[in-house]
Each structure stands twice: as C-alpha cells, then as structure tokens.
Image: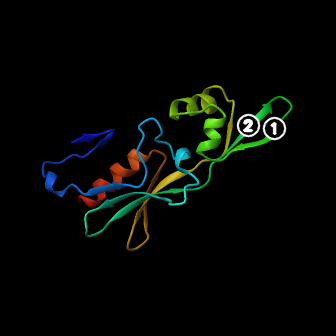
C-alpha cells in the first residue's frame, strides 16, 4: 500500500493502524518548518488501539536574513513560522532548500523537527525532519 511517500510493507493489511491527521498533509511541505507555531503541536495520531503514537513538531524555526554577508551585518528580520516563509516568497520545501542551501540567502539559527512519541509513556521514539517519514515510522512501530 502506498499513500504519498508513506509505504507500508506487509501482507496482513487488516493490522494497518488508523492514521488521523490534525493537519492537511502536503507533499510539497513535508519539512517541520511549515508546522511550527500551531496551537496543537500534535499533528498526527497513529492508533492501533493498544499503544497509540503521535507525531508532534518540536523545536523552533529561526531563519536569519543576512543583508550583507561580507560585512557581517544582518537585518533584524527572522523567519519564524509558515506565514513568514510565505511573506519572504518561500512556498514549498524545494524553494526553502534553494534559498537556504543553494543561494545561501537565508541562514538557519534553529531548525525544527518531528518527534514520534508514545502516548502512554510520553517516550520519544524517533526524530526526523520529514513528516511523512515520521508517520511511516510510527505506522511501522504500531504494526510490529
């Protein structure tokens, strides 16, 4: 079974857990930057009715906007949430990668991530930067 870039391997699909998205998944906005600052940090619930897992966003987004790299002078502007990204003309993961990695137009000061957390024990099982990778991991864990 394949949904987006989440792949579930196995022949017994009766054991596939319920996946409840508290956000609209967007294949072009898989990075944690797009989910910072939401009132509900629990983005996805992966439930097998025995040991549910959640995907939460952790950390803070802080991207500095250098005005002149040679002089070391930077503006006071920071990109700290999805709205700021859009204001600065960044609308998807590819544009963010280009602005930060290729053009060096912006510089990360903090980089948010996703945690996969066991609901009952509050134990963090996994951390990554891609929401689909986090959900895939959670699905594989509850199917074991």
Q: CA distance from mark 1 to mark 2?
A: 6 Å
Q: Residues within 10 Å of mark 2 (few under 14, many from 20)?
A: many
- The image shows residue 140 at horizontal and vertical percentages of 28, 54
- The image shows residue 54 at horizontal and vertical percentages of 39, 61
Question: Is the image coloured rainbow, by chain, by secondary structure, or in one colour?
Answer: rainbow
First-in-chain label (1 vs 2): 2
**Helix, strand or loop under label 1:** strand
**Residue pictured at 54% horizontal, 60% vertical:** 39
Q: Nearer the viewer, residue 28 or 107?
A: 28
Q: Quadrant of residue 66?
A: top right
Q: Residue furthest bottom?
A: 121
Whether pointer 1 and pointer 2 mark residues with C-beta atoms closer than 8 Å, the reply is yes
The tally of labels here is: 2
**Residue pictured at 55% horizontal, 55% vertical:** 38
- Residue 144 in the figure: left or right of residue 21: left
Q: Residue furthest top?
A: 103
Q: Is residue 60 above or below residue 121?
A: above
- Residue 19 in the figure: left or right of residue 59: left
**Residue pictured at 58% horizontal, 33% vertical:** 96
Quadrant in which the N terminus appears: top left
Q: Which residue is mark 1?
A: 74
- The image shows residue 101 at horizontal and vertical percentages of 61, 31
- The image shows residue 144 at horizontal and vertical percentages of 23, 59
Q: Nearer the viewer, residue 126 or 86?
A: 86
- Residue 17 in the figure: left or right of residue 39: left
Q: Which residue is mark 2?
A: 65
**Residue pictured at 52% horizontal, 51% vertical:** 113
């Amino acid at each position: 079974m394949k949904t987006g870039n989440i792949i579930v391997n196995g022949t017994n699909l009766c054991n596939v857990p319920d996946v409840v998205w508290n956000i609209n998944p967007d294949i072009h906005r898989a990075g944690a930057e797009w989910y910072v600052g939401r009132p509900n940090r629990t983005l996805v619930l992966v439930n097998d009715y025995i040991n549910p897992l959640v995907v939460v966003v952790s950390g803070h987004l802080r991207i500095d906007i250098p005005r002149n790299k040679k002089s070391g002078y930077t503006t006071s502007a920071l990109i700290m949430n999805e709205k700021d990204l859009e204001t600065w003309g960044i609308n998807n993961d590819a544009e963010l990668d280009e602005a930060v990695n290729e053009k060096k137009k912006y510089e990360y000061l903090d980089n948010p991530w996703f945690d996969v957390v066991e609901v009952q024990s509050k134990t963090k099982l996994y951390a990554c930067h891609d929401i689909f990778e986090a959900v895939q991991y959670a699905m594989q864990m509850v199917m074991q």
